[in-house]
Image (cartoon, helix red, strand yellow):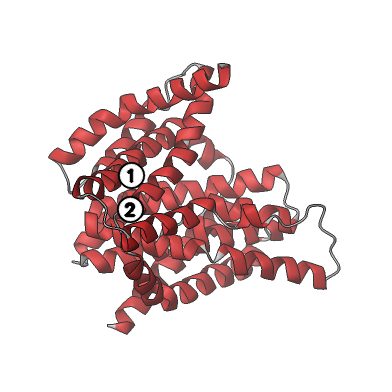
Amino acid sequence: MKRSLEIVSGIGAALVVTVPAWLLGRIVPIVGAPIFAIVGGMALSFIRRPSIFEEGLAFAGKKVLQYSIVFLGFGLDLGVVAKVGAESLSVMVFTIAAALITAYFLGKTLKLDPKINVLVGVGTAICGGSAIAATAPVIDANEDEVAYSISTIFLFNIIAVFLFPFLGHVMGMSQRGFGLWAGTAVNDTSSVVAAAFSYGDEAGRYATIVKLTRTLMIIPITLILALTRWRRGVASKSRLDMRKIVPWFVLAFLAASLVRTVTALPASAESTLPEIGKFGICVAMAAIGLRSNPLKLVRRGAKPLILGLFCWASVAVVALLVQWAAI
């Protein structure tokens, strides 16, 4: 009962930010509701809040986001999902390679812990915190290393939400072009959908498919890391759990798309369900903003931030170059 009250309280706090952000997003669509939600949450993050909100905000920032992505699946034809995944595969291969190579060589130059290098590289290459969480037990990373890496990735996620739409407009990118760029170059799922939907609905839908396809790359990357450590004779204290490696919401998103593809949903449901997903994304953005601590991230040290910056920049540039080369 207490936990339920805490979750409801935290979601309620996020809704206080979300509702005006949603309305502002309708008035100023070029900025978009997700960005207004993040900004509003971050602006209020410096105000001390009751501890009763914490669990609900954490729930909104993770679970509500995942459920919202599933709702977006009801607006997407599975044939389109497969097509977009195939179209973005070449870009993903190059961007993943760019992030991992940069993390390896720059991390050695900066003399960072090899586990930090792996976590930041994988987090940048695939899907931020989810990839870090899936990779950590494979390489026996401790809690401090995981927290440090996630904080580094999170900082550039927030920057990407603001910077990518601006750069997209400066470069005159199309909706699909920006969706491909955001889906392959922005780290975390929350930041991808925030940046892309701020650019436009078509960009948001396209980026979501690209990003979820990219998320599936957790599986081969994690298995390769596990095999590498096994070949080096490093015993892992924890076994691989495929349920943690394969994000459930990706499979549920595909299932929702399958329902949309093979059944004739009522017109009202076909338009309402994805809209619920978009609103839920704003709730998650507000919660993430409220829980953020920008000053604390910066104070943790410069070297991981430098590594994160160069990994992120290499992915963003390579994603553009590969996309332009294919035109």
**Residue at the far left in the pictured view:** 27
Say if residue 37 shows up in the picture.
Answer: yes
Q: Position of residue 163 (x, y in %)?
A: 31, 53
Residue at 32%, 31% (x, y): give it.
40
Q: Position of residue 174 (x, y in %)?
A: 20, 67
Residue 190, compared with residue 210, is above or below; it is: above
Q: CA distance from mark 1 to mark 2?
A: 9 Å
Residue at 31%, 49% (x, y): give it.
162
Residue 304, compared with residue 272, is above or below; it is: below
Q: Which quadrant of the figure contains the N terminus?
A: top right
Say if residue 292 shows up in the picture.
Answer: no
Residue at 45%, 72% (x, y): give it.
92
**Residue at the far front in the pictured view:** 263
The residue where tag 2 is placed is 74
Judging depth in this view, the residue of 55 and 319 nearest the camera is 55
Horizontally, is 36 left or right of 50 in the view? left
Q: Secondary structure at mark 2?
A: loop
Horizontally, is 11 left or right of 55 in the view? left
> Looking at the rendered structure, which numbered label has been put on residue 277?
1
Judging depth in this view, the residue of 253 and 155 nearest the camera is 253
